[in-house]
């Protein structure tokens, strides 16, 4: 009977721990709202701003170890300009025009590869 009670206590503690995910933080910043989202382990997942309920301005994304994996800009909910995506030793530079990919350049430690 003790073993069953211990098993239920263990399962209950795991369920409570998983239910307590880190909630996003929203802060007023001039005419925008700064948003910070978190991974389950507490590391920052994304940081950026909203304007009138739409993504706007610079956004940065991080993996669950805190390493930056993406950075770019939104203009009223649309990706714009040059975005950067990091994966291992590769950096992808992606240019957006009218919310569509216009050009992709892959950078690595040996030089560049250009893909259009």
Image: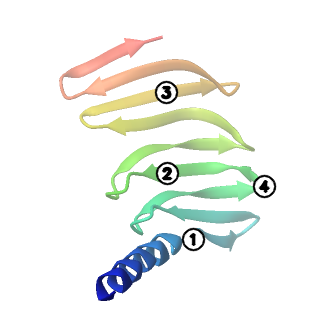
Q: Is 78 rendered above or below residue 68?
A: above
Q: Tell me if mark 1 has few (under 14), some (14-19) or many (20+) residues whose alpha carbon lies within 10 angstroms of its own.
A: few
Image marks 3 and 4: residues in contact by CB distance under 8 Å: no
Upstream in sequence: badge 3 or badge 4: 4
Upstream in sequence: badge 2 or badge 3: 2
Which is more foreground, mark 3 or mark 4? 4
Upstream in sequence: badge 2 or badge 1: 1
The residues tagged by marks 4 and 1 sit, at their Cα atoms, a distance apart of: 18 Å
The residues tagged by marks 1 and 3 sit, at their Cα atoms, a distance apart of: 30 Å
Element type where label 3 sits in the image: strand
Upstream in sequence: badge 1 or badge 3: 1
Q: Is 57 rendered above or below residue 25?
A: above
In terms of image quadrants, where is residue 23? bottom right
In terms of image quadrants, where is residue 88? top left
Which is more foreground, mark 2 or mark 1? 1
The residues tagged by marks 2 and 4 sit, at their Cα atoms, a distance apart of: 18 Å
Residue 23, numbered label: 1
On the image, the x and y values in percent for residue 51 come to 76, 55
The residues tagged by marks 3 and 4 sit, at their Cα atoms, a distance apart of: 25 Å
Element type where label 4 sits in the image: loop
Q: Which residue is mark 4?
A: 53
The residues tagged by marks 2 and 1 sit, at their Cα atoms, a distance apart of: 18 Å
Q: Residue at x 47, y 73 (%)?
A: 15
Q: Which residue is mark 3?
A: 94
Residue 60, numbered label: 2
Tell me the quadrant of the picture where the N terminus can be found.
bottom left
Which is more foreground, mark 1 or mark 3? 1
Q: Residue at x 63, y 65 (%)?
A: 34
Element type where label 2 sits in the image: strand
On the image, the x and y values in percent for residue 5 come to 37, 85
């Amino acid at each position: 009977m003790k073993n069953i009670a211990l098993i239920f206590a263990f399962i209950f503690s795991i369920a409570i721990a998983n239910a307590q995910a880190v909630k996003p933080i929203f802060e007023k910043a001039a005419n925008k709202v700064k948003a910070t989202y978190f991974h389950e382990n507490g590391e920052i997942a994304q940081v950026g701003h909203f304007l009138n309920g739409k993504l706007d301005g610079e956004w940065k994304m991080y993996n669950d170890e805190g390493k930056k994996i993406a950075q770019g800009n939104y203009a009223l909910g649309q990706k714009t300009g040059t975005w950067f995506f990091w994966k291992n030793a590769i950096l992808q530079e992606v240019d957006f025009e009218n919310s569509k990919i216009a050009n992709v350049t892959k950078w690595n430690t040996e030089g560049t590869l250009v893909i259009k």
